[in-house]
């Protein structure tokens, strides 16, 4: 920028003599004397020496800022442009239409451009520096700026056009104050793309009922990054408010079409639907609403974001501060995405479902009251209710009678029933039985329920420890929810497979929570979520599910005889995970101890985050299931949960030792994987010194290392092999060293007990004179290394493969 200004000023000095009172067209018609403004000694473009950092640069003119002045730029064909500067408020006012590209730099100066008979600028406008900017065209049918506009200002920026505000391809604003863009035509205020960055607020609107804010015919994108509020309004019944937008907002946000049409373009110029990418960059939570969401809302914490499209035809979208009110719940819980919330907002629809009580067996009904005791109207749907949150605190309760023993609560959309051991003995129900624990089950068996869109199963008992086991057999339901049982078994169940009903990623067909051990036997489901349980075991002849989420405190074991477990598995376990088979698209393993995968094919994307061993076996390297032959991108990645190093063994050969993440990319790499073993240093067998892990082995002993690190099955062979090699390698009768001190002594003796140089450190943790001399000589020769704290650690373990490697290095043949 400095170099550009210098060249510009030198050019002005060279042409000043030849263009004394003119520069092409328009010409300078009037100029004050040098005495009137010492900072601008001439009315023409001044020399570079006379311009300062406080100088106004107007196109190629350099003008002062210390005193008032007025100038006129005349053009016979286009009319005059009047420039006036007021020093008291440091304001440059430009009146008239400037008929070409205009560049202004006015540090600390307010710039006001006004077109009275046409545009303020007919061409591109660039303002590189100013205190504030106001560009206005008041002439009927005139745009404020007809070309692209780029403005940088320390303060506020406003652009107002009787027609468009900006008619060029691009608008870029970087401001330190509020930004206001207003158009007045039956079209877009901003014709194409716009990027606005400011610490203040942003307002984009139109004062014409037939106009909209940005983007004509689906063209251009809008990017707003504001520290304050963002308000965007405009549009018609057939024309959206904006095209496609990314909005980062530190205050409140409003996007509205006052005519009731779309706020986002249904079809952009590239054939895609318009989207709003919204980010809450402020310090407080906001309530996100849209007309298409009905009586629901999302609560956005600082840092939250969303992508909102045209689904549901939204005519307004807002994210604002609202007063929330406490919702106190007994025997029930918020449904779906509202789980865990304790406050709601006035006008928001509240959907509550029954929650299994620890000591209730008979449900007696719902009560919902305001804080003053007045009842709140609600609509009941089998085991749930809906009501509109008033502007006050509310208490809602699902009322239960005291439990006297184990019971099971079953509900469908049509009816519900509570059964106990006593009730089934008195009034048997076909398909429901009770087992008293004589074999495996201490609870209820439910068999052969079909065609129920939603089946909810709740376990009831006086205490948590007395909850019943549940076995569900031969069920064909669209949605199954199991909560509050002890052990649960699903046997030959088909879930989420009813015709005429589809499940999205967030709409799980199988939900199991608050249980102990879960067993799925030849059971399939669409989208499944199992959480708050201990162990999960699943075995099937076919695929298990499209998507399976498991979050448990114990172990996970999944097995299938089919090619794949399904589409995707997201697994988190406090124990180990063992998979026989794998999903074909995505496998995510989090926070497990050990993870084992034995599959015909690896998924497109497999990710392991573990503290223990990862053992992946691919039985058939040619059986990769490709989702799209045109997109052969595959990935296997491992993330250690600790900072300790780990050993990677690929197809039986130790490839490397590392502590960062590990990746295998693309289809060809994964096809080459027959066996991947990742072993943390702390889990290496006793004979492997974790201190030695991290050193790459390059000589013949590397074969031994590869064998040693390939798995527990070869440790016996490794032990025999290394002992035989050391017996043949070491001096006759020499004992195999087990510590660093013993290895140093052996090497020193074999070398003839030479003396180390005087510069070698004396190790404070060695008291024996011979061992001290041996350690000093070995470190001097580079055979062994000292510790970072200056000690030698003579009692540190040393593995047999390390002895072989050091001996070969010391006495190479």
Image: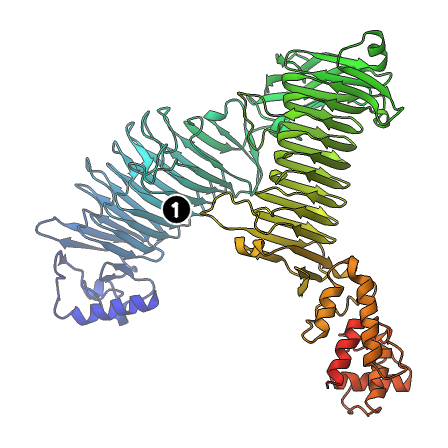
Q: Residue at x 83, y 87 (%)?
A: 750
- The quarter in which the C terminus is drawn is bottom right
Dot 1 crowding, Cα within 10 Å, few <14, some 14–19, many 20+:
some
Q: Position of residue 700 (x, y in %)?
A: 70, 75
Q: Is residue 667 above or below residue 524?
A: below
Q: Is residue 354 visible?
A: no
Question: How many numbered dots are placed on residues in this image?
Answer: 1
Return the residue at label 1.
Answer: 196
**Residue furthest to the top:** 427
Looking at this rendering, what residue extends furthest in the left direction?
76
| Image quadrant where residue 796 sits | bottom right
Front residue of 508/559: it is 559
Q: Position of residue 791 (x, y in %)?
A: 81, 77
Q: Toward the viewer: 467 or 560?
A: 560
If the image is split into quadrants, where does the N terminus sit? bottom left
Residue 504 percent coordinates (x, y) = 55, 30
Query: Which residue is drawn at the image coordinates 24% and 71% (left, top)?
Result: 10
Q: Quadrant of residue 178?
A: top left
- The image position of residue 111, as x and y in percent, is 30, 50
Element type at marker 1? strand
Horizontally, is 378 left or right of 314 in the view? right
Is 768 on the left-hand or right-hand side of 125?
Answer: right
Q: Vertically, is 302 above or below 484?
A: below
Q: Is residue 114 left or right of residue 794?
A: left
For the point 67% across and 19% down, the residue is 455
- The colour scheme applied to this rendered structure is rainbow
Visible residue check, residue 735? yes
Is 357 situated above or below 784? above
Answer above or below: position of 43 versus 260.
below
């Amino acid at each position: 920028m400095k170099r550009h200004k210098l060249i510009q000023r030198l050019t002005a000095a060279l042409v000043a003599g030849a263009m004394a009172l003119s520069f092409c067209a328009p010409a300078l018609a009037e100029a004050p004397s040098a005495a009137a403004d010492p900072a601008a000694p001439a009315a023409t473009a001044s020399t570079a020496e006379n311009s300062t950092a406080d100088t106004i640069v107007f196109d190629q003119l350099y003008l002062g800022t210390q005193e008032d002045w007025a100038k006129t730029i005349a053009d016979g064909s286009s009319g005059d442009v009047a420039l006036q500067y007021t020093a008291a408020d440091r304001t440059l006012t430009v009146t008239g239409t400037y008929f070409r590209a205009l560049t202004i730099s006015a540090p600390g100066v307010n710039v006001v451009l006004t077109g009275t008979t046409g545009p303020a600028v007919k061409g591109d406008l660039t303002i590189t520096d100013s205190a504030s900017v106001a560009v206005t065209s008041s002439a009927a049918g005139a745009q404020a700026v007809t070309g692209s506009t780029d403005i940088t200002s320390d303060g506020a920026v406003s652009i107002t056009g009787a027609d468009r505000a900006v008619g060029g391809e691009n608008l870029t604003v970087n401001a330190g104050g509020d930004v206001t863009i207003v158009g007045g035509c039956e079209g877009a205020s901003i014709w194409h793309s716009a990027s606005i960055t400011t610490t203040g607020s942003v307002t984009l609107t139109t004062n014409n009922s037939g106009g909209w804010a940005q983007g004509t015919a689906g063209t251009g994108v809008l990017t707003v990054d504001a520290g304050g509020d963002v308000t965007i309004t405009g549009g018609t019944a057939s024309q959206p408010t904006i095209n496609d937008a990314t909005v980062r907002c530190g205050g409140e946000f409003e996007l509205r079409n006052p005519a009731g049409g779309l706020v986002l373009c249904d079809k952009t110029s590239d054939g895609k639907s318009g989207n709003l990418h919204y980010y809450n960059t402020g310090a407080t939570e906001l309530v996100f609403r849209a007309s298409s969401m009905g009586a629901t809302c999302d609560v956005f914490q600082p840092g939250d974001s969303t992508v909102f499209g045209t689904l549901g035809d939204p005519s307004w979208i807002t994210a604002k501060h609202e007063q929330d009110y406490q919702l106190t719940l007994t025997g029930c819980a918020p449904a779906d995405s509202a789980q865990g919330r304790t406050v709601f907002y006035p006008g928001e629809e509240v959907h509550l479902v029954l929650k299994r009580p620890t000591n209730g067996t008979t449900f007696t009904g719902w009560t919902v009251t305001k804080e003053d005791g007045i009842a709140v109207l609600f609509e009941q749907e089998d085991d749930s209710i809906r009501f509109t949150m008033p502007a006050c605190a509310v208490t809602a309760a699902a009322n239960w009678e005291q439990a006297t023993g184990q019971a099971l609560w079953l509900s469908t959309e049509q009816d519900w029933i509570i059964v106990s051991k006593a009730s089934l003995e008195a009034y048997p129900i076909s398909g429901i039985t009770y087992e008293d624990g004589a074999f495996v089950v201490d609870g209820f068996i439910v068999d052969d329920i079909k065609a129920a869109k939603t089946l909810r199963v709740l376990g009831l008992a006086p205490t948590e420890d007395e909850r019943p086991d549940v076995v569900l057999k031969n069920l064909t339901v669209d949605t199954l929810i199991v909560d509050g049982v002890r052990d649960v078994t699903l046997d030959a169940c088909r879930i989420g497979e009813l015709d005429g009903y589809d499940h999205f990623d967030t709409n799980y067909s199988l939900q199991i929570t608050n249980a102990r051990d879960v067993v799925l036997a030849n059971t399939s489901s669409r989208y499944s979520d199992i959480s708050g349980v201990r162990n999960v075991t699943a075995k099937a002849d076919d695929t298990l599910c499209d998507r399976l989420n498991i979050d448990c405190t114990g172990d996970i074991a999944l097995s299938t005889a089919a090619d794949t477990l399904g589409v995707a598995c997201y697994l988190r376990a406090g124990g180990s995970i063992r998979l026989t088979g794998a999903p074909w698209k995505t496998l995510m393993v989090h926070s497990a101890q050990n993870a084992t995968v034995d599959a015909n094919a690896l998924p497109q994307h497999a990710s392991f985050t573990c503290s223990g061993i990862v053992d992946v076996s691919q039985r058939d390297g040619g059986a990769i299931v490709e989702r799209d032959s045109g997109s052969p991108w595959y990935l296997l990645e491992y993330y250690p949960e600790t900072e300790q190093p780990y050993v990677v063994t690929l197809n039986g050969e130790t490839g490397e030792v590392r502590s960062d993440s590990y990746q295998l990319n693309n289809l060809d790499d994964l096809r080459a994987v027959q066996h991947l073993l990742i072993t943390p240093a702390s889990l290496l067998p006793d004979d492997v010194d974790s201190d030695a892990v991290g050193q790459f082995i390059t000589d013949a002993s590397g074969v031994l290392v590869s064998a040693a690190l390939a798995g527990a099955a070869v440790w016996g062979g490794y032990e025999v092999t290394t002992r035989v090699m050391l017996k043949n390698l070491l001096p006759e009768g020499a004992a195999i060293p087990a510590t660093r001190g013993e290895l140093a002594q052996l090497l020193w003796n074999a070398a003839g007990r030479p003396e180390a140089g005087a510069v070698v450190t004396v190790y404070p943790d060695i008291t024996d004179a011979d061992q001290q001399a041996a350690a000093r000589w070995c470190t001097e020769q580079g055979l062994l290394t000292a510790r970072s704290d200056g000690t030698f650690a003579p009692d540190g373990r040393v593995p047999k493969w390390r002895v072989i490697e050091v001996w070969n290095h010391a006495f190479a043949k």
